Image (cartoon, grey):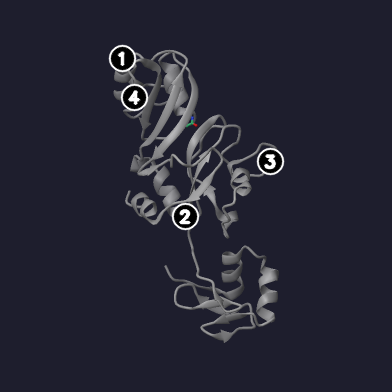
């Protein structure tokens, strides 16, 4: 969507330079809009129709950024700086450079000891849509358990497990391998605090390892190592927005 913003904001959004640095570029005459040198930082430009260049090189405007991370264990899903390392600290350590890094936030929360798919974006509307209970977005987890999964667990999960403070929506529980009932895939369409762990506790089991494999149409890229981040493809973004 096109919008009109100040030239210095356009440039700092798109280059990760500070406002004062881009103002300096502007004053030095390094910036053109549609071929004309602009020397006033407050000049309004249109993010879609104006062609903005630094030293003759075009700088397009991108509003939203979408990334998937393979979250490692030992980091919390937060954007707040504190004593504990966060997923955003992990992001910063990668080679992926987002010009609007400070606007990014994770979609939903994984526990400190949970690994796997985490979507990170500055698209607040999509974030809200994916988390909204009314959209029932499926999340698939792989869990390793202390005890084998019982046939009755599959039944109990699918009929809506009562956790005392809330009744879970029907969840799909699948044993990964008939020879090894200590590993299972579970699909839930809500995201209550510690939900998967609490569901297994309720059937006298315990999650020893948990990894998120997918969220809606978005599937964790098998080539993404723990702690790595990549941009979503255009197809992945389009499919995610179809909810
Ligand atoms: N359920 C949990 O118990 N933990 C997670 O991190 C995600 C879902």
- In three-dimensional space, the C-alpha distance between marks 1 and 2, rounded to whole angstroms, equals 41 Å
Residue hosting label 2 = 123
Q: Residues within 10 Å of mark 4 (few under 14, many from 20)?
A: many
- Which residue is nearer to you in this view: 133 or 89? 89
Residue 242 visible? The answer is: yes
Provide the secondary structure element on which disc 2 rests: loop
Give the foreground label among 1 and 3: 1
Residue 151 tag number: 1
Residue at 45 percent across and 28 percent down: it is 195
Q: If you read the primary sequence from the N terminus, does the residue marked by circle 4 or circle 2 appear first?
A: 2
Q: Dot 2, how many residues are within 10 Å of its Cα: few (below 14), some (14-19), or many (20+)?
A: some
Residue carrying label 3: 82
**What secondary structure is marked by label 4?**
strand
User: Which mark sits nearer the N-terminus, 4 or 3?
Assistant: 3
Query: Can you give x and y, in whole percent of width and height, for residue 56 in the image?
Result: 57, 79
Name which residue lies at 31% across and 14% down.
152
**How far apart are the two marked residues, 2 and 3, measured between alpha carbons?**
24 Å
Local secondary structure at mark 1: helix
Q: Which mark is residue 173?
A: 4
Which one is earlier in the sequence, the residue at label 2 or at label 3? 3
Marks 4 and 3 in Cβ contact (< 8 Å):
no
Q: Earlier in the sequence, mark 1 or mark 3?
A: 3
Please state which of the two labelled residues, at mark 1 or mark 2, is closer to the viewer: 1
Earlier in the chain: of badge 4 and badge 1, it is 1
Q: CA distance from mark 4 to mark 3?
A: 36 Å
Sequence-wise first label, 1 or 2 = 2
Q: CA distance from mark 4 to mark 1?
A: 10 Å
């Amino acid at each position: 969507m096109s919008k009109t913003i100040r030239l210095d904001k356009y440039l700092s959004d798109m280059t990760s330079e500070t406002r004062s640095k881009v103002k300096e570029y502007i004053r030095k005459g390094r910036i053109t809009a549609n071929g004309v040198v602009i020397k006033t930082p407050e000049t309004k430009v249109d993010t879609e129709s104006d062609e903005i260049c630094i030293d003759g090189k075009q700088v397009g405007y991108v509003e939203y950024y979408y990334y998937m991370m393979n979250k490692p264990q030992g980091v919390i899903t937060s954007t707040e700086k504190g004593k504990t390392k966060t997923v955003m600290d992990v992001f910063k350590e990668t080679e992926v450079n987002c010009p609007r890094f400070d606007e990014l936030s994770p979609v939903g929360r994984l526990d400190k000891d949970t690994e796997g798919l985490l979507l990170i974006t500055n698209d607040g509307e999509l974030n809200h849509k994916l988390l909204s209970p009314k959209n029932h977005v499926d999340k698939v987890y792989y869990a390793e358990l202390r005890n084998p999964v019982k046939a009755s667990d599959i039944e109990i999960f699918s009929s809506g497990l009562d956790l005392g403070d809330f009744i879970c929506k029907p969840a799909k529980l699948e044993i990964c391998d008939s020879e090894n009932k200590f590993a299972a895939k579970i699909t839930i369409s809500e995201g209550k605090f510690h939900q998967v762990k609490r569901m297994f506790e309720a059937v006298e089991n315990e999650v020893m390892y948990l990894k998120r494999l997918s969220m809606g149409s978005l599937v964790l890229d098998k080539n993404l190592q723990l702690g790595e981040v990549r941009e979503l493809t255009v197809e992945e973004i389009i499919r995610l927005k179809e909810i």
